[in-house]
């Protein structure tokens, strides 16, 4: 095993604004051997997530920043190629924190075994993985949707947003997406079954929401923050729930992030705004995965992945998220 070569992206500087290739060092080292309780995993697909940008920043967050000189943190799916733990065998397919590299030596207990025959591997990083679970717990647990309510979601064609709108439909709600460009808007309505979509790059978001949410917005699942959050806040229904999942429009700001101006709408409408991190729901992941897989099998939940080839593309591929150039869950085929 020690002859296996492992290419790795190490974070070498804290990015200012958008991530750049020069924020990383691309090195090759031996893959290493699993110690007691550990496995060596060949990484097959890497999950590219907007949160990675935050993990590169210094400062307190829900998770420690990636240290300078450390392999960049990433979720991934791979195959066990050597095992020193009875719970996993060579050939098993596992999901977990692999890092941006070809191989990882990890504790077996930190990886989750999945069945590669049930779904294409990238799906376990998307609708059947962390983003799907984010949609599931965020919408259902925090949003508490009721039949007939209007649910608005931003980044609606993305990994989390696409699942949010589809679950809203499953629960008998009206689903309105906000996404960038006519192709993504057509996709969420025609393929995913949303009731309407607003192209924030080419349309007036306020006018679109007024047209499609004439009784106000009962639930807003916010993935983007910024101006769109402000517009939605001004159009809330009574007792609305605003779910703060992410604020991708703000992640590359050089200054501090821009907060909502229209928050007094929460007071006027007796509404609630609540944030969450999916990891807080770890104990309930099996429930979420079972529900998502069940809907997928029943044809009620569709998913799409955007697969880019080559570990070496990592810094450039990550930028796609912040330019809206991904269409579906963004993964790298290692
Ligand atoms: P994604 O939606 O698949 O990809 C990101 C999308 O964000 C882009 O495709 C783009 O779509 C949109 N976007 C980028 N810059 C934007 C801007 N300035 N204004 C408006 N939209 C912009 O990514 P994802 O993995 O599903 O993540 C979506 C959000 O959920 C992110 O904010 C992420 O941080 C958050 N998240 C939170 C948790 C949690 O536990 N709280 C977990 C996972 C993800 P358009 O082409 O439509 O602009």
Image (cartoon, rainbow, N blue to C red):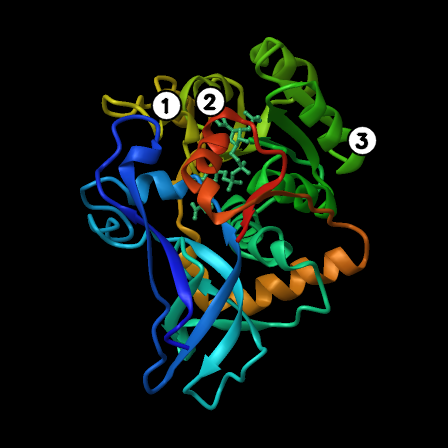
- CA gap between label 2 and label 1 equals 7 Å
Q: Are marks 3 and 2 in contact (CB under 8 Å)?
A: no
Q: Please give the residue where the numbered disc 2 appears in the rendered image.
A: 233
Q: Is residue 258 left or right of residue 328?
A: left
In the foreground, 139 or 131 = 131
1 or 3: mark nearer the eye:
3
Q: Residue at x 29, y 50 (%)?
A: 62
Secondary structure found at label 1: loop
Q: Which residue is mark 3?
A: 190
For the point 45% across and 23% down, which residue is it? 229
Q: Secondary structure at mark 3?
A: helix
Q: Residue furthest bottom?
A: 86
Residue at image location 62% in from the left, 10% down from the top:
203
Quarter of the rendering containing residue 50: top left
- Residue 28 in percent (x, y) is at 34, 56
Q: Which mark is residue 263?
A: 1
Relative side of 185 to 26, left or right: right
* 2 and 1 marks in contact (CB < 8 Å): yes
Q: Earlier in the sequence, mark 3 or mark 2?
A: 3
Circle 2 residues within 10 Å: few <14, some 14–19, many ≥20:
many
From the viewer's side, name the closer residue of 327 and 203. Answer: 327
Mark 3 surroundings within 10 Å by alpha-carbon count, few (fewer than 14), some (14 through 19), many (20 or more): few
Can you give x and y, in whole percent of width and height, for residue 306 in the image? Answer: 62, 41
Q: Residue 57 lies in what quarter of the image?
A: top left
Residue at (51, 75) in percent of width and height: 80
Q: Are marks 1 and 3 in contact (CB under 8 Å)?
A: no
């Amino acid at each position: 095993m020690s002859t296996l070569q492992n290419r790795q992206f190490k974070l070498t500087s804290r990015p200012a604004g958008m991530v750049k290739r020069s924020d990383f060092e691309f090195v090759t080292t031996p893959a290493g051997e699993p110690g007691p309780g550990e496995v060596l995993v060949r990484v097959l697909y890497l999950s590219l997530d907007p949160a990675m940008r935050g993990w590169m920043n210094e400062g307190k967050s829900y998770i420690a920043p990636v240290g300078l000189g450390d392999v960049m943190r990433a979720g991934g799916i791979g195959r066990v190629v050597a095992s020193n733990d009875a719970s996993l065998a060579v050939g098993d397919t596992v999901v977990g924190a692999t890092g941006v590299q070809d191989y990882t030596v990890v504790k077996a207990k930190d990886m989750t075994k999945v069945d590669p025959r049930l779904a294409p591997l990238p799906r376990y990083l998307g609708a059947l993985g962390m983003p799907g679970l984010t949609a599931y717990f965020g919408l259902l647990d925090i949003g508490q949707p009721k039949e007939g309510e209007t649910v608005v979601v931003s980044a609606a064609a993305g990994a989390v947003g696409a699942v949010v709108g589809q679950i809203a439909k499953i629960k008998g709600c009206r689903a309105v997406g906000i996404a960038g460009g006519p192709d993504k808007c057509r996709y969420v309505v025609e393929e995913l079954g949303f009731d309407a979509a607003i192209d924030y790059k080419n349309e007036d978001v306020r006018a679109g929401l007024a047209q499609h949410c004439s009784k106000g917005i009962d639930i807003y699942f916010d993935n983007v923050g910024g101006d769109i959050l402000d517009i939605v806040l001004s159009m809330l229904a009574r007792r609305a729930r605003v779910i703060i999942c992410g604020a991708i429009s703000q992640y590359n700001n050089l200054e501090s992030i821009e907060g909502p101006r229209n928050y007094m709408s929460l007071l006027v409408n007796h509404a609630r705004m609540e944030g969450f991190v999916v990891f807080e729901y770890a104990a309930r992941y099996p429930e979420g995965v079972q529900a998502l897989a069940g809907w997928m099998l029943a044809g009620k939940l569709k998913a799409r992945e955007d697969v880019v080839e080559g570990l070496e593309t990592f810094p450039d591929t990550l930028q796609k998220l912040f330019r809206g150039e991904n269409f579906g869950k963004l993964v790298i085929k290692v």
